[in-house]
Image (cartoon, grey):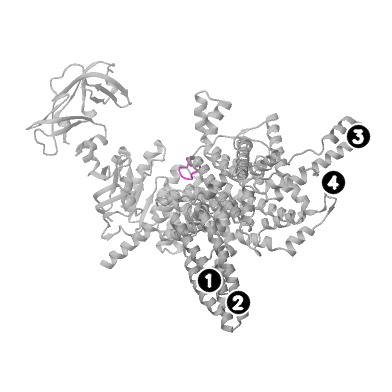
Amino acid sequence: MDIRLTGVTKRFKNVEALSRVDLHIRDGELFTLLGPSGCGKTTTLRLIAGFYVPNEGKIMFGDREVQEIPTSKRNIGMVFQNYALWPHMTVYRNVAYGLQFKKAPKSEWPAMVNEALAKVGLVGYEARYPGQLSGGQQQRVALARALALNPDVLLLDEPLSNLDAKIRGSVRAEIRKLQQSLGITTVYVTHDQEEALTLSDRIGIMCDGKLVQIGTPHDLYEKPSTRFVADFIGTNNLVPGTVEAVGEDITVVTELGTIRGFSHSAVKPGEKCTVAFRPENVEVHTAQPSLQDNHIHGKIGFASYMGNTLRYEMEHPAGVLLKADIKNPLRHEELGWGSDVYFSFPKSAALVIPD
Amino acid sequence: MSSGKTMIGFRRWLKASNPWVWPIYLFLLVFVIFPLVRLFVDSFSTADVQLSALNEVVLTTDLLEERVRAGEMEGASAVAHDITLQLNRSIDVIDRMMEALGRATFSQDELIAKWRNAQDRVAQEAAVMAELQHDPEAALAEAKEARALIQEIKRLPRQAFSVKFFVDVFRDRLYMKALSNSLLLGFATVITTSIIGFTVAYLLVRYDFPGRKAFSFLTTVPIVMPPLVGVLGFIFILGRGGTVNELFYQLAEGLERSWPFMSNWLYDHLPFNFVYGWHGLLLVETCHLFPLITLNVLDSLSKIDASLEEAAESVGSIGLKRLFDVTIPLTIPGFVTGALLVFIGAFADFAAPMVVGLTNFIAPLAYMDIQQFTDRHLFKMGITVGAVMVVLSIVFLLIAKKYVSMKDYSTLSYRAVERKPLKGKWAALALVFLILLLLVSFIPYIGVGLASFARSWSMSPLPTSWTMVHYEKVLLYAPGYIINTFQFCILAIIMCILIGVPVSWIMARTQMRTRGALDVLTMLVLALPGTALGIAYIRAFNNPILFSVPLANIWIILPIVLAVRRLPYTVRSSYSSLLVVHRSMEEAAQSVGAGGMKTFKDITFPLIWKGVLAGALFSFMTSIQESAATLLLSIPGWETMTMGIFTFYTGGTHGDAAALGFILIVVGVITLFAMNRLSSAAKGGLFG
């Protein structure tokens, strides 16, 4: 079932938490709402769930208008950040609780609960209380509870944030597999961009109550449409400047000198813009290279070793901090603090984003 | 389509305005705010002048009319004479009225002029009536005119704003002495109970020693103390002719041969004065009230996250330094609440001072002013003292407000500091301290218990013969006291739950604007002395509203005043229970299809009922002991056990009073035990 939000606005007292959001989540896809805290992503999810009623706008589940329909009648499944398992009920009763509202005959409950628990691999834990389970197990019970009712829509509110970093990866993969095998429309809220990139069919980036950009993980990484997205997704070097000329390639005047780049949108000379280039596309040279399109001269400020990469930070005299990643640090002789270096990158790596 | 839109609009409006809270606001408005406002209006107005002389004129005129019609001319003459006298008395009454209005803070010259004009006209009527006494027909015509005049006069405003009585209370040395005595007692009790209460709480939370669990219950028991006989219990044991002094006399007798010096010294100094005077009063109040500090500090103390103390240790702060710099400041919120309760308890206690032979405390003074019916001025002073007490409790609440608010709770998830086992002499020391404390605190129970079974008890350490006659009397011949108490208190806690749970719900679960006001209101009720609330109720519900009988004369007023008095306990425990139940638990139920009522029934209720019930039981336990408000509002035929204790005590049948008191203690302790079990099962605990 697809979900469509049209012009949805939500105000708390006088604060506009969400302003005129339009969003179409396709049938069967895993859609992630991503953004920093306070951006409105949880508000959006809770509007879809029905815990909030929008002040303006429409929410459609398929061709059903739901914004006035209470949560209990929307046929959703939700996994809460703190799981919200009922401590006074066993795992079985937690999962079975919703079945009474689906008019399922009581004789079928054990089979339905068993099926739901089988999906998350927790068969055999029926008699336990939530307090007797580990965090990961609680999380899976919460998922089973949400899936037991065969909901039209699955809503996940930062479901992994309370788990250890180690198991987070495996649970993430499980959720994705399960979602794909069930083909259930899923809305996933997170502030973790890595989680969003690895998990989602599409991502909506939110900032200050607005949807800034919607796209596949690939689109968002490669074609950020705003400076905010370029900064939020992955690591980026961002340099403000002014477009000088638009020809075969675009030249931009910045504090670091003129940079040649490209753009996905139409830019005009004289326009304010930001040049974004990723650290992994930057080469580090001790002498000025002749072949590259762009090079910036400065001194090494800081080097951080991260196992598979080595990140240099360069302090440019203009006060801008630039980053460059060396892919295979073993093959590289580390440069010391204050070494004179040239950061160079091709124009195909320098994305010009109009402000 | 448009009707659908209207329905949606209506539903939205209904959802936003929450009509289910209106009855609750109405209750609070009528039974909390209105009486208090009325109390202040009364104390800031000029004196009440009774217009009975004027009313008599009206009635007598009717009589005159009757006589004339019946042709009893002689009788009519006498009645006409009466009217003349009553008119003359009315002139005096109006004099007093003008005098009272003259004391108004803002000049009431205009109003006084009206009254003077009225007085002149009454005087004229009186003069004419005096002439016409022998002509009843003419007198009747005149009297009818007088009656019309008086009905007109009765519509004139009779009171004006005045600070006279308020100022009078502060000018009167008797009241000031009483006020300062009560304040002093309050502060002194806060100090003693704080030391004991904090020590007990710290031992119970931080250390492990034999019997810790039993002690954690037993140290709350002293809150159960029936008025009057509780103190009386101390006197039975520690008084001049009490058990302890009697034992000393026997000791002195026994030592006459073997150790004459000691024996003589004892004879010279006996009886020891343990209870009569300030030290006794302080002892009684401390033993009774320290659990309030323990309960509240216990709560704050057990919620201190271990990392906070570890952090202090990491920067080198250990031992007492850490205790005073980190631990104690973190318990301040609980402590201040407890201290406020202790202060009000001691400040407004009106039985204990009387029993230990100290007079002149503010609460008994106000009580006596209100209870007498002869002197209007004293009555008014009593009302004003009630208002002064309310003002004082508001002031103390404002001082403590920063900490006493139920909102802005500390974290709910914390890692408790681990208990250290106490060993060797330290364990012994802790046990000795706790056992001594309990021994002293339980003295009233022993005294009341012995007295209730005693046939005769004087000049001996223990009663010499035993009897059940006191119990027979209070259980079989006059069971009304017990039945009434149970009826009223059970009704009161039902009201507490019906009002308290929604109030705490509003505070914990909604964004309603009234949350702050409800918080302040509950805390104010918590801080109000019973005497003040009782006086406020007497004034507010003394006139018939809606019903033909004034509410103050209907028994329902008693459960209502008890419910209002104890509402804060239920609100607090429900609120903290609700805080423990994370909102997402309810949302999860909705997400799988449960509606609002179903969610409450299956999720919220099972998770909070223990906490709610624990609070309600605390409300019950303190309700059965309530004396101030119920004594003031006592209605003949509907007396409670505390009233019974007062009646028996003042009637000299101490044994019957003790029997009622002992029943009260037993019920109280059982309730406390049940509450203790419930609140340890409920995660929220009693006070959050």
Image point (27%, 43%), residue name? A206
Q: Name the magenta segment's main secondary structure.
A: loop
- Residue B80 image point, x, y percent: 58, 74
| Subunit that carries the residue with mark 2 | B
Q: Is residue A294 left or right of residue B2?
A: left
Region in magenta: B404-413
Among numbered discs 4 and 1, the one appearing first in the sequence: 1
- Residue B479 image point, x, y percent: 71, 63
Among numbered discs 3 and 4, the one appearing first in the sequence: 3
Q: On the image, numbered disc 1 is attached to which residue?
A: B128
- For this rendering, which residue is in front, B506 or B549? B549
Image point (71%, 57%), residue name? B647
Query: How dense is the environment of label 2, judged by Cα within 10 Å: few (below 14), some, or many (20 and up)?
Result: many
B669 within the magenta span:
no
User: Distance between the Cα atoms at labels 1 and 2?
Assistant: 14 Å
Q: Residue furthest front?
A: B131
Q: Is residue B557 left or right of residue B153?
A: right
On residue B77, which mark appears?
2
Location of residue B225 with respect to A314 vertically, above or below: below
Quick check: marks 1 and 3 in contact, CB under 8 Å?
A: no
Q: Secondary structure at mark 3?
A: helix
What's the residue type where badge 1 is placed? Val
Quick check: marks 4 and 2 in contact, CB under 8 Å?
A: no
Q: On the image, numbered disc 4 is attached to which residue?
A: B460
What's the residue type where badge 2 is placed? Ser
